[in-house]
């Protein structure tokens, strides 16, 4: 009786697992968390601060340069900054193979060092003046030539930059209110 119950349970579990596997949908994205929708991603990437656009733009440039980013493009008319920062340099796996060594009379391993490549973080920061507030939208992309590019949807990375911009604005206003 117990054996029949166990085999029925195993059959049901296998059928459910196979249905999820074959369905082709991404049930969970990373580490069991459901994927974010567009509204959630936009909420992570957006921030509003009560300050003039020109002051927010200057503070943003100083913060990004302080974090080690290089400002590649800036357009004050449209409120747009592009910056690039190095995340890490890596080396691809070594390419190893075996060849027959007649002198040693055995197979020996030969390896070529894997090529070096860099992983960059590219930022796009857009500004828009709405009344007394400046709306910021920050898009962070990890540029990886080996594994493909991906948009960062980590709330901490965005909040860190936004809080530093807000802190810079606060210090600037408190030290020089004019």
Image: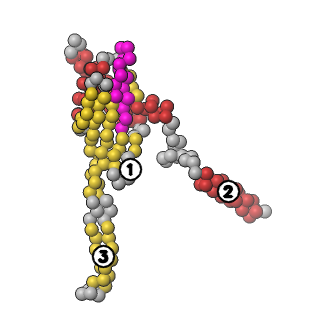
Dot 3 lies on which element? strand
**Which image quarter: residue 13?**
bottom right
- Residue 15: which numbered mark, if any? 2
Residue 103 occupies which quadrant of the picture?
bottom left
For the record, the magenta segment spans: 126-140
Secondary structure beneath dot 2 equals helix
Magenta stretch contains residue 137 = yes
Task: Specify few, some or many for label 2: CA neighbours under 10 Å numbering under 14, 14-19, or 20 or more.
Answer: few
Q: Is residue 31 covered in magenta? A: no
Residue position for label 1: 148
Comes first in the chain, label 3 or label 2: 2
Residue 42 or residue 158, whichever sits in front: 42
Find residue 80 and report its horizontal and vertical position in percent.
Answer: 31, 29
Q: Residue at x 46, y 34 (%)?
A: 41
Q: Could you say where residue 31 lies in the image, as x and y percent from the top left?
A: 49, 47
**Residue in the foreground of this view, choosing between 15 and 38:** 38
Q: Residues within 10 Å of mark 1 (few under 14, many from 20)?
A: few
Q: Is residue 151 left or right of residue 105?
A: right
Assess disc 3: are there few (<14), some (14-19) or many (≥20) residues with their C-alpha within 10 Å of its C-alpha.
few
State the separation of the CA atoms marked 3 and 2: 46 Å
* N-terminal-most mark, 1 or 3: 3
Residue 19 percent location from the top left of the image: 64, 53
- Give the mark nearer the N terminus: 2 vs 1: 2
- Colour scheme: secondary structure
| Residue at the spot of label 3 | 109
The image quadrant where one finds the C terminus is top left
Residue 67 in view of the camera: no
| Residue 125 image label | none
């Amino acid at each position: 009786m117990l054996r029949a119950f166990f085999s029925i349970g195993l059959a049901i579990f296998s059928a459910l697992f196979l249905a999820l596997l074959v369905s082709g949908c991404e049930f969970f994205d990373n580490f069991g968390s459901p994927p974010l929708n567009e509204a959630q991603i936009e909420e992570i990437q957006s921030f509003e601060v009560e300050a003039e656009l020109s002051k927010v733009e200057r503070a943003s440039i100083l913060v990004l340069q302080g974090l080690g980013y290089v400002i590649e493009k800036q357009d004050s008319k449209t409120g747009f900054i592009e910056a690039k920062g190095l995340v890490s340099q890596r080396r691809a796996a070594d390419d190893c193979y075996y060849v027959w060594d007649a002198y040693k009379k055995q197979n020996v391993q030969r390896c070529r060092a894997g090529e070096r490549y860099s992983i960059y973080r590219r930022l796009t920061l857009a500004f828009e003046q709405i009344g007394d507030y400046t709306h910021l939208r920050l898009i962070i992309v990890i540029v990886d030539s080996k594994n493909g590019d991906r948009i960062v949807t980590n709330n901490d990375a965005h909040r860190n930059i936004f809080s530093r911009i807000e802190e810079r604005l606060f210090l600037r206003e408190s030290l020089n209110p004019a």
